[in-house]
Structures are given as C-alpha cells and as structure tokens.
Amino acid sequence: MTPLRARLPAWAPYAVAGAWLLAGWLWLVRGAAHPGVAYRPWAFDHHAYTDLLAMGGDRYFGGGRPVPWLEDRIEYPPLLVLAIWGASFAPGGPAGYFTAGYLALAAAVLLSLRLLRRIPGADPWWWAGTPAIAWYAGLNWDAIPIALLLAAVLALARGRAAGGGALAALGVSAKLFPAALLPGAAGALLGAGRRRALGAAAVAFAAVAVLVNLPVAALSPPGWAFFWRHHAARAAENSAWEALRHLPGLAPLAASPAFLGAATALLVAAAAAVAARGAFRARPESAGRALRLAAALVLVAWVAVNKVWSPQYFLWVFAAAALAAVPFRLFWPLSALAIADYHLAFEVRSSRATWRFGDPVYTAEELVRTAMLLGLAWWLARELWREGGQAERAP
C-alpha cells in the first residue's frame, strides 16, 4: 500500500516545513526584547534559546561590528562565521539581526527539502514533517551545512563527482559533519571503477577547501586556528560521555579532551570504514542507495558518539534518515526524543527548574538518546551490508 504522505500534492511538504519554520520564528524572536547579558537567563527560563541572539548580543547589539578573525574569534569554520557576521548588517536591532539570520536558515531548510525531493530514493517527509524544524532550525546555523551536504549527495547521484567534491568542501567549511559523505563516496567511486572521477572529486574538494580557508588562515592564523583549538580543548558536554562522571575511577576521563577526542575519532573511523567498505562492495543497481546509507551511517554514528552534543544535532539525524529513507515507524519516536532533549537541556540550565535533580534526569536522557542513535546506526550498517555484491560483479 502506498503511504499517505506519498499521495499528498507536491507542495504539501513545503507547506508543513514552512509552518514549522514560522512557529519557530514566533517562539524565538521574543528573546530579541531581552538582549545582552539578560538574554541567556531569560531564554533558559522560557525554553526559547537561540545562538543567533546569544552570540549576536555578545558582539553586535551594542553598536559595534567586530571583524571576524581579526577583531573577533568565533568557534566556527569560515562560512558560518560569515553568516553570523553578515546578519549584523541587517537593520532593526536584535529582532532585525535574528530575523535576517533566520530567513537565511529557513531558505536552507526549504532548499534541503527541494534537494531531498530530487535525490532518488530519499524520503523528504523525514525532513519536512518533523517538528524538530520548529525547535532547531533557528537554534544554530546547522541548516546551512546540511543543505550543502545534500547538494553534494545529489551531485554524486547525477554522476557529477567534481561538483560533489566541491560542494562537500563548502559543507565542511561551514561545519565538519558533511565530511561524513567522503568515505562512502570514495568507496562507491572505487567500487564502480571510476578512479578518474574519484581523482576529480578529490581535487575539487581540496581546491575549494583551500580557496575558502587559506585567505582566512593567511589573514589571521590565530583567528582561523581558534576553531580547532577551541574544540580540541572541550571535554564532555551534554553527551553520553558525561555518564563517566558517575562511575568510580572513570570520572576524570569525562574531563579529558585527549581521551575523549581519541575515543570519538576511533569510533567515527570505525563507522567510516564500514561505510567505505559497504559502498565499495555494493551491487551496481544498488550503488545510489549504498551511497546514501553510507553517508547516513557515518553522520548518525558521529553525532551519537561525539564528545560534545548540541540539541540541534537532531537536524542532522533527520537529514540522514531522509537520505536513507529509514522506515517511517521510527519518525515519531525520534521526533518526540528531539523535543524532549531540547526542553530537558534548557530546564537543567533554568533558574526556575521544576525539579531539584534535573542533571541526573538529563544524563539518563543522554544515554537513551545515544542508545537510540546507535540503534539507528546499526540499522543503517545492516542495510548497507545487505546491498553488498561486489564479488558477484562481472569481470
């Protein structure tokens, strides 16, 4: 039987996503009335926090506009830094700044939906239908690199390896997560015998990455390197690794950036190896699905085991599920978990918390969240392996 969502008109997913986006803007823009130092306490108390207003208040709402890297070090790659700074030219004070940034993010959300509708085998309703858009589209700038990742997948699906490499480099220059596409893409191109295409993709990726990052690194080496130093020094934050604090003898590991960085890298590398191998051995008729599964596998595994978790990472999970066309029966449990994660995270930080022991409750939710995401990663890995058949290919 054809599911109901597949029988809806072509404009329906855009209407639903647009409604979620409008609801998110109406909920978050209220914080513009509390700029500066007062914003974070107000936002946590009202469960209406957004990095756009928090970071904008730290930098721009007092009348200045510090130049990124030279006068202002921001813990993001270059393309997101330009998005943060660019919104400061919008008129209208805090509300104008937030609205300008939110419109850019809303455009990225709708562009992502259009890209998913064009990627063969993807399920765009995983993206358009989730209420996580209302909660997270305006929390941070993740919608921009998600759109770039999906554009890279579409380019590869259409046989444009160099374009896929260039778009992936733009995505990585906005946030590191789009690098999740690379292992599966390399495996798929090698498995298909397209070594020249793989070379073209690699050259395009390197060229665009250098083109975006080198001018910033040359202009201000400390400013460009701040992103790497900042994240290398972070310990466990809102991730399942925080559970180590409750285990005798292991608590120091939760505060060890070196251990957490190595452990995360090892786990993500394992997922990348499975993705590359699975995409390499996929049957020719399954190559497109194998690429989508491989990218989704690395992406979900990465956000699940990362030492730092931010609630908007659920957007990456839903983008991955849309790419892989995960069974829709998992849609509502993940959507409910995404909303619960948001409110638990900010209730713990609220000055008027409704329970006395919020932190242990949030730690328990971190473990549930990680278990669900690792379960999803397992499903993706299993499906990817079922697409295997390299040994059956004709010479």
Image (tube, helix red, strand yellow):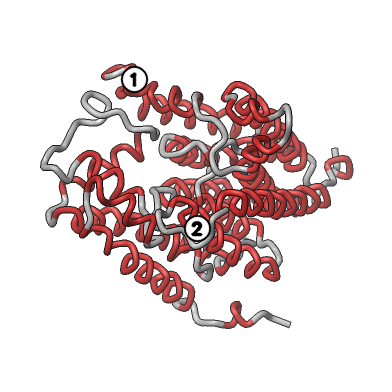
Q: Is residue 94 above or below residue 179?
A: below
Q: Residues within 10 Å of mark 2 (few under 14, many from 20)?
A: many
Count of number-bearing discs: 2
> Does residue 287 appear in this view?
no
48 left or right of 194 in image: left
Q: Nearer the viewer, residue 127 or 154?
A: 127
Tell me, yes or no, whether the two marked residues, 1 and 2, touch with CB atoms within 8 Å.
Answer: no
Q: Is 169 on the left or on the right of 120, as rendered?
A: left
The residue lying furthest to the front in this view is 356
Residue 331's x, y, as percent?
A: 63, 67
Q: Quick one: SS at disc 1? A: helix
For disc 2, the marked residue is 342
Of helix, strand and loop, which one carries label 2?
A: helix
As shown in the figure, which amino acid type bears the numbered disc 1? Answer: Ala
Residue of label 1: 217
Three-letter code, disc 2? Tyr
Q: Nearer the viewer, residue 184 or 240?
A: 240
Q: Nearer the viewer, mark 1 or mark 2?
A: 2
